[in-house]
Amino acid sequence: MPDIPQGDVEKGKKLFVQRCKQCHNVDKGGKNATGPALHGLWGRKTGQAPGFGYTTANVNKGITWNKDTLFEYLENPKKYIPGTKMVFAGLKKPKDRADLIAYLESTTKA
């Protein structure tokens, strides 16, 4: 298990707005955009957001999204899921990833 720092929801919200919002939506009932809607992300398997056209790599990864998997994924998405179409390069700083995860956990749990 990775050693995940304590996340700050407000800092995570700022990161989401700066780095993720252009492609993702966190609102309940939110629509898919360039990326899948993230509400209900917690506990969902990769490639399973309803109505979103995923790559085979995402569908076949078969992991369940939680703090640990997101922490690893958000560092380098293309390394974690080779073949993903997500263009986001990742967040190298562990604290940034922890902050973003804290925000996602606070807003996307179904």
Image (cartoon, rainbow, N blue to C red):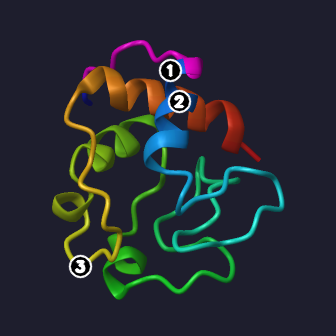
Q: Is residue 49 left or right of residue 19?
A: right
Magenta region includes residue 4: yes
Range of residues picked out in magenta: 3-10
- Marks 3 and 1 sit apart, C-alpha to C-alpha, by 30 Å
Q: Residue at x 24, y 43 (%)?
A: 75
> The residue tagged with tag 3: helix, strand or loop?
loop
- Check contact, mark 1 vs mark 2: CB within 8 A: yes
How would you rate the neighbour count of disc 1 (Cα within 10 Å): few for under 14, some for 14-19, many for 20 or more?
some
- Check contact, mark 3 vs mark 2: CB within 8 A: no
- Look at mark 2 in the image and give the residue it sits on: 14
- Check contact, mark 3 vs mark 1: CB within 8 A: no
Q: Is 84 located above or below residue 89 in the figure? A: below
Image quadrant in which the N terminus is located:
top left
Q: Is 14 located above or below residue 89 in the figure? A: above
Q: Nearer the viewer, residue 1 or 21?
A: 21
Disc 3 or 2, which lies upstream in sequence?
Answer: 2
Q: Position of residue 80 (x, y in %)?
A: 22, 58
- Marks 3 and 2 sit apart, C-alpha to C-alpha, by 28 Å
Q: Which mark is residue 11?
A: 1
State the predominant SS element of the stretch in magenta. Answer: loop
Q: Quadrant of residue 98?
A: top left
Disc 3 or 1, which lies upstream in sequence?
Answer: 1
Q: Amino acid at mark 3?
A: Gly
Q: Residue at x 46, y 34 (%)?
A: 15
- Look at mark 3 in the image and give the residue it sits on: 83
Camera-side mark, 3 or 2: 2
Q: Is residue 97 left or right of residue 93?
A: right
